[in-house]
Image (cartoon, rainbow, N blue to C red):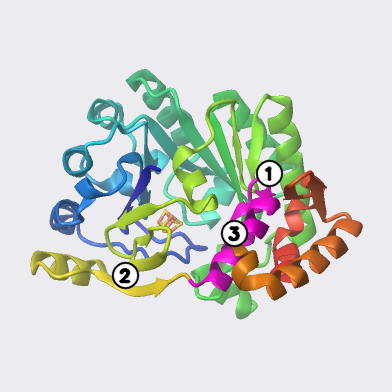
Amino acid sequence: MTLGAYIQVPFCQTRCTYCNFHTGVVSRDRYEPYAEAICREIATSDLASGPKVDTVYFGGGTPSLLDPALLTRILDALRRASGGELTEVTLEADPETITQQKASAWFAAGFNRVSLGAQSFNDRELQAAGRMHRREDIYRAADFLRAAGFRNISLDLIAGLAHQTRESWEASVGRVLRILPEHVSVYMLEVDEDSRLGKEVLAGGSRYGAADIPDDDAMADFYDYAGERFAAAGYEHYEISNWGLPGRHSKHNLKYWRREPYLGLGAGAHSFDGLSRWANVHDPARYVTLIERGASAREQIETVVPPQALQEEFYLGLRQLEGIDFARIERDYEPQLSDRLITLRERIDQLRSNGFIEVDGPRLRIAPDRLTVSNEIFVQLLG
Ligand code: SF4
């Protein structure tokens, strides 16, 4: 068993209109103390005695805002503490933050995968979403990354942005395929009522394109269209939101869906060790203060009791197109949760007869043509 390390960098240049993440716009002076605190958290995390870290993911926020020297410092601290061979080291990056110098410095530091937050190739959609980049920045960023040596680029798109139409979506998908990243993620926009966009929608206003958001049917249509195009281009659909060229599935993210251990470092980062889940305090200033004082930043520590673990097996595992090994789950949980398993079997039979779930020997998966209603399936199965 190996360990995934997640480094949270909760800083952004501006706040996107749809954003519901714990992230903030702060003075650049705060980046270095924050990076130092992460190094200290790594050094005191007892990484040497547990499983070796093999995947690292810098997410946010916008980690590409940090000076490459700070990112390198964190990565070196992780290498020193764990001693494992890092096979996949991903940096989330916004296109407008990438320069040739930065891309080269990242590659030299040991990053071998960049997740590029493109979201759309349509400038009107990008502007309404409050993104800082435009279509040309995405092309430029991809060129810089390739020139620096990156052979594993992931690109994110969002289905459901304000002003998005079937035509603009087709154009964005086509442009992804011009860049030909090794990996693509498509997220369906969920308008959070606490985001600027969500508040505008609730108020019946039209700022940020709030009056021009595609409906659920349109989003499902966009998603299906993207899946068809990606499949035709040789991408494997391996998780609800993710496609990869052969051998390019995200090793780090697979750990989440397979309930393998990962350690989150930084403000608001979540961790799982197979038995418990916990999160660090969300406020970056408080996080830095706690770590500088030598105190733990962990809170919300909860033991994962068997009923919750069983829920997670389905909720996380069924996100993968290969599904879950239900025979193994029955073996693992039968002694403690036989009643719960009886209910689950009944619900599975019902969902199967309605075409929502497919059974193949011991394996169970969501029918590929029903992935757009996966949330409803989870409710029917686990609710
Ligand atoms: S870049 Fe990401 S984390 Fe930052 S404001 Fe935009 S959506 Fe939120």
Which residue is the site of mark 3? 332
Which range of residues does the magenta coloring cover? Answer: 305-332
Question: Mark 2 and mark 1 in contact (Cβ < 8 Å)?
Answer: no
Which residue is the site of mark 2? 282
Q: Say if residue 345 shows up in the picture.
A: yes
Q: Nearer the viewer, mark 1 or mark 3?
A: 3
Q: Nearer the viewer, mark 1 or mark 2?
A: 1
Residue situated furthest left in the rendering: 293
- In whole angstroms, how far apart are the C-alphas of marks 2 and 3? 34 Å
The disc labelled 3 sits on which kind of residue?
Answer: Asp
Q: Say if residue 209 shows up in the picture.
A: no
Residue 128 is a magenta residue: no
Drawn side of residue 344 relative to residue 13, left or right: right
Which residue is the site of mark 1? 321
Pick the front one: 344 or 317: 344
Q: Residues within 10 Å of mark 3 (few under 14, many from 20)?
A: few
Q: Is residue 332 above or below residue 249?
A: below
Residue 27 picture location, percent across and down: 20, 60
Drawn side of residue 106 relative to residue 31, left or right: right
The disc labelled 1 sits on which kind of residue?
Answer: Leu
Mark 3 falls on what kind of element? helix
Quarter of the rendering occupied by the C terminus: bottom right
